[in-house]
Amino acid sequence: MPAANPTTHRRPSGLKLLQWGLGAWTAAVFVFLYLPILVLVAYSFNTSRLNVVWEGFTFRWYGELFGHGPLIKTLKNSLIIATLSTVFAVIIGTAGAWLLHRYRYRFARAIQTLIFIPMVMPEIVMGISLLVFFTTVQLDLGFVTAVIAHTTFCFPFVMLAVQARLQGLDPAMEEAALDLGASPWQAFWLVIVPCLRPAIISGALMAFTLSMDELIISIFTTDPASRTLPMQVFGMAKVGLNPMLNALSALFVLITIASVLFSEHLRRLASR
Amino acid sequence: MITIRNVTRRFGDFVAVNDVSLEVKAGEFITLLGPSGCGKTTLLRMLSGFESPDSGEIWIEGRDVTRLAPYRRNVNQVFQSYALFPHMTVRENIAFGLRMQKVPADEMRRRVAEAMDLVALGGYEDRLPHQLSGGQRQRVALARAIVPRPAVLLLDEPLSALDAKLRHQMQVELKRLQKRLGMTFVFVTHDQEEALTMSDRIAVFNRGRLEQLGPATEIYHRPGTAFVADFLGDANLLEAEWLAAEGDNVRVRLRGGLEIAVARAAWPGAATRAVVSVRPEKVCIAREPVAGAENGFQATITEEIFQGALDRLVVRTDAGTTFSVVVANESAMMEAFHEGERVWCGLHIDDLVVVPAA
């Protein structure tokens, strides 16, 4: 070959520069995302009351956390609300996904859209509208209203996960069950639900996490006795940062990562 | 066993099954054959209960099942995708139908073991479907469908996902199994060879209509329509024009100009035009006039395609009609035919099938 075009010499170095740039950019994004969390976790073990200087290692804040009445009380409330709304969200979301998938309805598309709008609707709007609704039907705020509210914004997530799985499900699966003598209910319960299990579990994990995390809608739909953990934390943080909150956050980070890994694991099991 | 009476099923403007009537005898292996979209699968789904006819009736074992739900019918189906339950083991899959019938545990165990023996799946009881090969899954689907002892077994292209060798093997096994069980099989396929291999009778469908029903040999040798002649095996379909009656025969002119004699009895009524169907293997080719053939003529070989055991030739008669011809690739004692060669052709009058013009 005759002498190569000079630009072919420069191209690899240009590429290398691009690779470096992209690498640095990626690193910057991850630092931006995770450094605050790492700092937060680190300071939960700091003996100092202030989040600025490192003085020494301690588990003291974790101990104080579990001795803090209001935090424990609101944590219990949050767990109760999250568990119940997850159960309802799973039932409604799974049944809804199956019915919309399996049967033909008039306005099926409209129904679908209307169900998913709450996922993107500002929480403040949902909070206010739920409050107006509960007042109109004269339902006193408390656990019942909180569970209803949380179920409302959680079930579309379950439904979405289940619908995605249904798309890939062999339509002959239900027919095979019916053909072998199963009633439509038996076919759903014995064949369809087990096929959907990974989607149901990952949807449930998502619903549970969202519910535990919800602040704004909870503000509008709880009474003092059913205050949730995020409300308590928000109230405490307004007064001043406290290493106990660092400890609490560290625990939450741990739980969240665990549940994300778990649902990812399920997703991989399912796609096998 | 099965009576299908004037069944019609429409999807919007599309008539999937058009006024079909059909009787299936007990213990018969019947194949619904046709190209995709011909209505065979829709008819099968009406037998299993997943579709119901817009009009007409379906009777199974002397009972009107036209509007009966699938889970109340004494029929089972082998699905094209097999539709094995992925979370159940082979044993649980096979036992599912018996579980739904609330069969006692010990009887269930015995019958599942029997069915697994029947399809040679012993040792795979605790495997999950995704741990099996395609052929094994097919056997599980088969065992699962026969273990409840249905009056009729419906098979929806169950072999289409298997490779050619396994498919041939399963064709033979299926036929053997059906004979042994004495069960009525309704088999759907678009594969004419599969239909010819296994069926007691074949029902050929085209555009929602039942074109012809009969034993394999009859369907092959005596097709009633141009579609059937063309769909099963190869056929030279040549438009023919009535020229004159000659005793028991009719003198006709084929497309291209060749004049031959066909049996008067085969000609459709008073029509002036019809279609003559000639199987490529029924055209005799020789280097001298063919003895014993009512129709003899000279032609030139215009194409020769080597196909292993067979040679496929295209010949053009002096009158201008072309035929596709298949000859066995014989031993070295006989010289093969070559392109451009002049040959004699012979057509026996009994090998000529006349079908109504389309």
Image: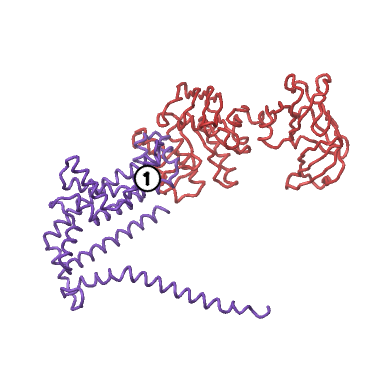
Q: Position of residue B131 (x, y in %)?
A: 45, 51
The residue located at (21%, 52%) in the rendering is: A218
Split into 4 quadrants, where in the image is the N terminus of chain A?
A: bottom right
Residue B47 located left or right of residue B252: left
Quarter of the figure with residue B171: top right
What is the chain identity of the residue bearing mark 1?
A
The residue pinned by badge 1 equals A113
Q: Position of residue B213 (x, y in %)?
A: 61, 27
Image colour for chain B is red
Can you say whether A131 is above or below B31 in the image? below
Quarter of the figure with residue B290: top right
Q: Position of residue B283 (x, y in %)?
A: 79, 35
At mark 1, the secondary structure is helix
Identify residue type, mark 1: Thr
Can you say whether A194 is above or below B251 in the image? below
Q: Judge by depth and name the residue closer to the eye, B192 or A162.
A: A162
The residue located at (79%, 42%) in the rendering is: B314
Q: Judge by depth and name the residue closer to the eye, A186 or A90.
A: A90
Split into 4 quadrants, where in the image is the C terminus of chain A?
A: bottom left
Q: Position of residue B286 (x, y in %)?
A: 84, 39
In purple, which chain?
Answer: A
Q: Judge by depth and name the residue closer to the eye, B136 or B192.
A: B192
Can you say whether B187 is above or below A113 in the image? above
